[in-house]
Amino acid sequence: MKEIVLENTLPKVFVQVKDLQSEVWNHHVTFEKERLYLVEANSGTGKSSLCSYIFGYRKDYEGRILFDGADIAQFKTRHWVNIRKKSLSLLWQELRLFPELTAMENVDIKNKLTGQQSKQQIESWFEQLGIADRMHAKIGRMSFGQQQRVALIRALCQPFDFIFVDEPISHLDDTNSQIVGELLTTEAKRQGAGVIVTSIGKHIELNYDKVLKL
């Protein structure tokens, strides 16, 4: 996939809103591979909805969303399975980890499906993010900031043309935020992928190609 296009896309809940101030909703917006984007938003402006729409989880919007010119509203289940396995990776704001499993088990679920990363690479990421000693701890016993780092590693364990990270550093200190940015951009560059970061405040400090106000 080379580009994602939003054509006058608008959450149905906002249809009656007058004077909607947004550079995304009800506009023509293009996300391209190999570029970095920041989508800044206030709470309640549809940031997480945007991720859900593009990932095909929700369809309660007007307008169109196109992947390389194809309207995603027409995609069948088999199309989404292939897209989510090979083209799109998403780090959800709520993480969606399995609390009864260990950190490594959560990562392995994804990596065993894709075979994308070596065990050495995954362990190196745990080390760089300062959670190597938590690899075999259950997610439910880890802090939210530690869980965010595990979720990032999991998101990197697949091939992707675009990776969405929804508030990925909300519970991280500046040092770990910088490391997250480095790992994210390094892997995206290796895969020739686009990166879309969303935030309602604190965000990864990167050299963004474009900043959009949601």
Image: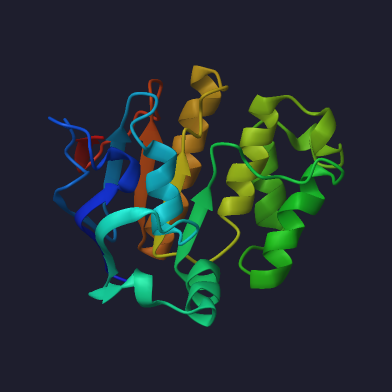
Q: Position of residue 85 (x, y in %)?
A: 55, 70
When the figure is inspected, residue 114 is found, relative to residue 189, above or below; the finding is below
Is there any visible trace of residue 60 in the rendered image? yes
State which quarter of the image contains the N terminus. bottom left
Q: In which quarter of the image is residue 141?
A: top right
Q: Where is residue 148 in the image (x, y as percent from the top left)?
A: 62, 34
When the figure is inspected, residue 136 is found, relative to residue 88, above or below; the finding is above
Q: Going 16% across and 39% down the picture, which residue do you hit?
A: 23
Q: Going 51% across and 24% down the picture, which residue do you hit?
A: 170
Q: In this view, does 110 lie to the left or right of 28?
A: right
Q: Going 86% across and 37% down the picture, which residue do you hit?
A: 137
When the figure is inspected, residue 71 is found, relative to residue 210, above or below; the finding is below
Is there any visible trace of residue 128 in the rendered image? no
Q: Which colour scheme is used?
A: rainbow
Q: Nearer the viewer, residue 100 or 192?
A: 100
State which quarter of the image contains the C terminus. top left
Q: Quadrant of residue 194?
A: bottom left
Q: In this view, does 123 lie to the left or right of 187?
A: right
Q: Nearer the viewer, residue 124 or 18?
A: 18
Tally of marks: 0
Q: Where is residue 118 in the image (x, y as percent from the top left)?
A: 68, 63
Q: Quadrant of residue 133?
A: top right
Q: Going 32% across and 29% down the picture, which residue do you hit?
A: 41
Q: Position of residue 61 (x, y in %)?
A: 33, 53
